[in-house]
């Protein structure tokens, strides 16, 4: 699979470019779109935090808002990458039924296009963090690895869901619904520590544990919990491999069943 | 010479209805057990064989034609060759870089410009970006879309659209090329260009598989032709032989269809029922009074009409017309023609024979229309429109809509 992907890397790049171009063509806002969704999500998070501080009587702390901002970005990447990749096979049915090329380039391309938005947002975030004087520590070196885990997990899930959606179109609707409410089940607006001994329940979700680890190393300047960190890494790799395998098994039937 | 394509006893199954999958199939797929691609032999309900035991080999540099009626399995064969779907049984070996001139615009996105689409479509068809960079100017020039190359293709006319698609596809350099009815793209000038490009490919030792309904084209480009019908190889051999055979099958089917239609019409009650005279039988022969249905082009044709006049009829006029299956009236003869035959009065059973001689009709299906008129041709006693004969194709060399193919003599003076 890797060999074929390398052989068709230009195609992967072109497909991602196509998705990006289409998104920004005939759009007034242009690249501002890339940060539109994160900004909306951050504002929602701030309102939630504000409401909680009113109820509890504690003042609104800046660090809480920074944490939300840092965690929202990967989350919105996850949402858009999954949304695009779920549809990536079905929306390219003419290609799948008419031309041969490695089909994994379609979900990969969709994820790559979302990654592009993510990096634009990430650049804006770094500037914001510098202005807010969040500071920097050795732990920031962990972030690239955490992002790689996060992308692997997203890609694995994208492969599974895109091929499942090819067979059953309701997968897309189920995924949309889960993504809409998923933010409440994931420690984005709040910290998993708030839940005390139920914390593990939130961290079992690899997204939860990765987001917390990112928060630890970027905002709190501390070493993330090594146990949960290794759990997140292992499960991401596992999901990725599982996704590749699942996709590969079903691929020969794509053209007939789509 | 080595085989670049081997299609070994390939079977392909399709589903007629809507396939209902169950999640039960997907779960084992996730854990390593491959989805059963059908156990080969047994057909489930709603399933049918699109290809049955199709077996052929193609040598390097060969140009193979595949012909057959719609739904015979030609496109399925190409899809299996290009790897879009796997066979249920059998094995396909491909040696070399394969590209397909099929659905050349499938990779286009309407929102993108011509330039962007050249790159997108090129990479989808298997080219590298560098390759496209190098050929970009040629592609644009070939497509004649120079000034529109930065316009989104959604603003293109359909002709421009397919021209761009063909131009991209034509600039691939494959070892094996699959072609499926793409030469009918654009206006006449562009078609000529496409034909030139094809000829270029033919001379470049590229192995080509051509699927087309244009038999004349297949004949001029291919040495060997495969005829596929109902998913099976029906005939394989030299282009002239296979194409002639296929054309005759088409004519025969056409004739049978016509016969069926006529029979169905016969069952309907006739309004113009006249009992004064009946045609009891019509015999078509080459002169020896043995009834025949199919003739060679240069065979003499004669028709004998057996009638039964219930009353005395004075000077009836017999009229006979030969009509081709597409409605063209080929020739007509009447006893009232100058110097033809003076009929006196008839009564009871009788026969009348007309000898057409060598008609030299082109291959196809023909209907004989018979009228018997009263002496002033004011009123037809009976019309008969149900006798059919066929002219066999002996050698397919050109497709013609002409009625007659007389034996002519050319001479340079």
Image (spheres, coloured by chain):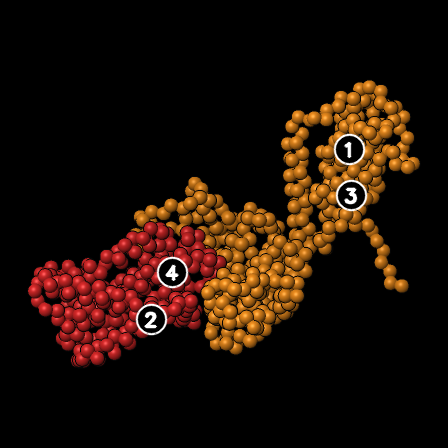
Chain colours: A red, B orange
- Local secondary structure at mark 4: helix
* Chain letter of disc 3 in the image: B
**Figure quadrant of residue B224:** bottom right
Q: Is residue B395 left or right of residue A199?
A: right
Residue assigned mark 2: A32
Q: Chain of mark 2?
A: A
Mark 2 neighbour class, 10 Å CA radius: few under 14, some 14 to 19, many 20 or more: some
Q: Is residue B178 left or right of residue A95?
A: right
Residue A88's disc is 4
Q: Nearer the viewer, mark 1 or mark 2?
A: 2
Camera-nearest residue between B158 and B55? B158
Q: CA distance from mark 1 to mark 4?
A: 65 Å
Q: Is residue B125 above or below residue B364?
A: below
Mark 3 and mark 2, same subunit? no
Per the image, label 3 sits on a secondary structure element best described as: strand
Chain ID, mark 4: A
**Pointer 1 indicates a residue of which chain?**
B
Q: Residue furthest right?
A: B339
Secondary structure under tag 1 reads strand
Please tell me how crowded label 4 is: few (under 14), some (14-19), or many (20+) other residues with Cα within 10 Å: many
| Residue in the foreground of this view, choosing between B358 and A193 | A193
Residue at 49% x, 56% y is: B80
Task: Name the disc covering residue B370, or none.
Answer: 1
Q: Position of residue B212 (x, y in %)?
A: 61, 56
Position of residue A121 measured from the top left corner of the image (x, y, whole percent): 29, 72
Dot 1 and dot 3 within a common chain: yes
Mark-to-mark CA distance, 4 and 2: 24 Å
Q: Nearer the viewer, residue B127 or A62?
A: A62
N-term mark: 4 or 2? 2
Please tell me how crowded label 3 is: few (under 14), some (14-19), or many (20+) other residues with Cα within 10 Å. some
Against B122, is B53 above or below? Answer: above
Q: CA distance from mark 3 to mark 4?
A: 58 Å
């Amino acid at each position: 699979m890797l060999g074929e992907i390398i052989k068709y890397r230009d195609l992967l790049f072109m497909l991602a470019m196509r998705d990006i171009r289409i998104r920004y063509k005939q759009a007034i806002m242009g690249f501002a779109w890339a940060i539109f969704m994160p900004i909306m999500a951050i504002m929602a998070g701030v309102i939630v935090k504000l409401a909680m501080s009113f109820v509890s009587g504690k003042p609104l702390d800046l660090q809480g808002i920074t944490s939300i901002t840092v965690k929202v970005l990967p989350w919105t990447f996850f949402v858009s990458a999954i949304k695009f990749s779920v549809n990536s096979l079905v929306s390219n049915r003419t290609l799948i039924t008419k031309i041969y090329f490695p089909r994994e380039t379609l979900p990969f391309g969709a994820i790559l296009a979302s990654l592009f938005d993510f990096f634009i947002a990430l650049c804006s975030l770094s500037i914001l963090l510098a202005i807010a004087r969040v500071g920097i520590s050795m732990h920031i070196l962990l972030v690239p690895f955490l992002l790689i885990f996060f992308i692997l997990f997203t890609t694995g899930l994208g492969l599974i869901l895109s091929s499942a959606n090819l067979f059953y179109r309701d997968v897309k609707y189920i995924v949309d619904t889960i993504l809409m409410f998923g933010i409440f089940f994931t420690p984005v607006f709040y910290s998993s520590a708030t839940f005390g001994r139920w914390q593990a329940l939130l961290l079992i979700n690899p997204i939860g544990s990765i987001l917390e680890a990112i928060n630890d190393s970027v905002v709190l300047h501390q070493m993330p919990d090594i146990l949960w960190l290794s759990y997140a890494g292992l499960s991401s790799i596992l999901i990725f491999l599982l996704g590749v395998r699942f996709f590969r098994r079903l691929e020969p039937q794509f053209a007939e069943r789509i | 010479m080595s085989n670049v394509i081997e299609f070994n006893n390939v079977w392909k199954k399709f589903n007629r209805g809507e396939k209902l999958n169950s999640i039960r199939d997907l779960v084992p797929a996730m854990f390593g057990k491959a989805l059963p691609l059908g156990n080969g032999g047994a057909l489930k309900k709603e399933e049918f064989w699109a290809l049955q035991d199709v077996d052929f080999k193609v040598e390097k540099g060969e140009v193979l034609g595949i012909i057959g009626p719609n739904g015979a399995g030609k496109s399925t064969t190409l899809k299996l060759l290009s790897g879009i779907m796997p066979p249920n049984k059998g094995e396909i070996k491909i040696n070399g870089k394969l590209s397909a001139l099929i659905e050349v615009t499938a990779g286009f996105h309407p929102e993108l410009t011509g330039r962007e689409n050249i790159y997108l479509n090129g990479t989808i068809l298997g080219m590298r970006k560098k390759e496209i960079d190098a050929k970009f100017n040629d592609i644009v020039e070939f497509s004649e879309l120079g000034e529109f190359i930065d316009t989104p293709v959604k603003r293109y006319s359909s002709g421009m659209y397919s021209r761009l698609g063909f131009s991209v596809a034509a600039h691939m350099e494959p070892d094996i090329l699959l072609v499926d009815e793409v030469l009918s793209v654009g206006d006449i000038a562009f078609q000529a260009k496409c034909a030139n490009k094809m000829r270029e490919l033919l001379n470049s030792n590229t192995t080509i598989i051509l699927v087309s309904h244009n038999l004349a084209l297949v004949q001029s480009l291919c040495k060997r032709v495969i005829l596929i019908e109902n998913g099976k190889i029906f005939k394989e051999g030299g282009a002239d032989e296979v194409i002639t055979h296929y054309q005759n099958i088409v004519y025969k089917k056409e004739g049978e269809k016509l016969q069926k239609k006529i029979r169905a019409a016969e069952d309907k009650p006739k309004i113009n029922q006249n009992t004064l005279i009946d045609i009891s039988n019509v015999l078509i022969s080459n002169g020896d009074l043995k009834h025949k249905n199919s003739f060679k082009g240069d065979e003499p044709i004669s028709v004998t009409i057996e009638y039964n006049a219930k009353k005395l009829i004075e000077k009836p006029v017999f009229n006979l017309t030969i009509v081709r299956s597409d409605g063209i009236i080929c020739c007509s003869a009447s006893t009232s023609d100058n110097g033809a035959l003076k009929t006196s009065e008839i009564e009871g059973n009788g026969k009348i024979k007309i000898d057409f001689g060598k008609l030299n009709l082109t291959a196809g299906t023909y209907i004989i229309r018979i009228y018997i008129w009263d002496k002033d041709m004011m009123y037809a006693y009976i019309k008969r429109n149900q006798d059919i004969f066929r002219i066999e194709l002996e050698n397919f060399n050109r497709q013609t809509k002409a009625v007659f193919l007389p034996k002519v003599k050319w001479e340079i003076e």
